[in-house]
């Protein structure tokens, strides 16, 4: 990899780590509202699928090693057994796919629709994790861990698509 690619990836990791601190607990769910999805979408829009996979792997490894890079400044391997653990796993699968589906043109529409794909993929893992952890039905886990976030995630997908489409042509590929 070239120095420019590594630098772009390192900046994406840093932005993702910082965005984890922009989290807000909600009184009706065990999962906080975060800006992680916005920053991960941006990374997926400006990186290749392979680079996005590496960025997400490094982010998850940093958090697993105990660095406070997960939502609310938490870290450690135990976070994968917390209410947000399934979402962390979902991120690893969702965002490289988003990077693939965004294509090579910087279109807000294409980026937005690719970004929308991240929502069901991430929720699949997140809701599944809540079912296992809280020992609740899929319906109850969906109401707790997905339903309150759908509108916000759609808005974040649009914001990321708009910013990503503006950034994409400015960055070397």
Image (spheres, grey):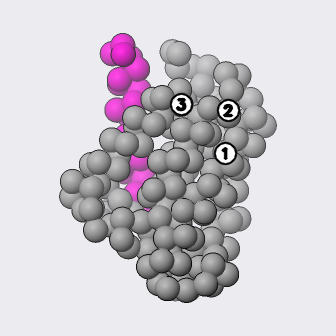
| Left or right of residue 18, residue 112 in this image | right
Disc 1 to disc 3, how far (Cα)?
13 Å
- Name the residue carrying label 3: 49
Query: Which residue is rendered at x = 62% and y = 71% of the image?
Result: 146
Query: Which residue is rendered at x = 44% and y = 68% of the image?
Result: 84
Image mark for residue 102: 2
Image mark for residue 134: none
Q: Nearer the viewer, mark 3 or mark 2?
A: 3
Q: Residue furthest left?
A: 66
Image position, residue 43 (x, y; %)? 50, 37
Whichever of labels 1 and 2 marks the residue nearer the N terminus, that label is 2
Query: Which residue is rendered at x = 52% and y = 20% of the image?
Result: 171
Image position, residue 90 (x, y; %)? 51, 55
Count neighbours of disc 1 (C-alpha within 10 A) and say few if under 14, some if 14 to 19, many if 20 or more.
many
Q: Quick check: can you spot residue 31?
A: no
Looking at the image, is 111 positioned above or below residue 155? above
CB within 8 Å, label 1 to label 2 = yes
Asked which secondary structure carries label 2, the reply is loop
For the N terminus, the image quarter is top left
Image mark for residue 115: 1
Count neighbours of disc 2 (C-alpha within 10 A) and say few if under 14, some if 14 to 19, many if 20 or more.
many
Whichever of labels 1 and 3 marks the residue nearer the N terminus, that label is 3
Image position, residue 25 (x, y; %)? 46, 76
| Left or right of residue 153, residue 25 in this image | left
Q: Quick check: can you spot residue 170?
A: yes
Asked which secondary structure carries label 1, the reply is helix
């Amino acid at each position: 990899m070239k120095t420019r690619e590594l630098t772009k990836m390192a900046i994406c990791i840093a932005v993702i780590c910082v965005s984890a601190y922009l989290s807000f607990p909600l009184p009706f769910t065990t999962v906080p509202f975060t800006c992680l999805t916005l920053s991960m979408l941006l990374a997926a829009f400006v990186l290749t699928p392979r680079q996005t996979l590496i960025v997400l792997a490094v982010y998850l490894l940093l958090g697993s090693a105990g660095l406070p890079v997960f939502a609310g400044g938490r870290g450690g391997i135990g976070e994968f057994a917390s209410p947000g653990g399934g979402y962390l796993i979902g991120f690893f699968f969702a965002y490289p796919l988003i990077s693939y589906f965004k294509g090579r043109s910087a279109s807000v529409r294409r980026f937005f629709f690719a970004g929308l794909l991240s929502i069901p993929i991430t929720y699949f893992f997140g809701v599944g994790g809540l079912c296992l952890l809280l020992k609740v039905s899929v319906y109850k886990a969906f109401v707790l861990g997905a339903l309150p976030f759908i509108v916000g995630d759609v808005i974040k997908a649009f914001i990321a698509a708009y910013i990503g489409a503006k950034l994409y042509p400015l960055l070397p590929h």
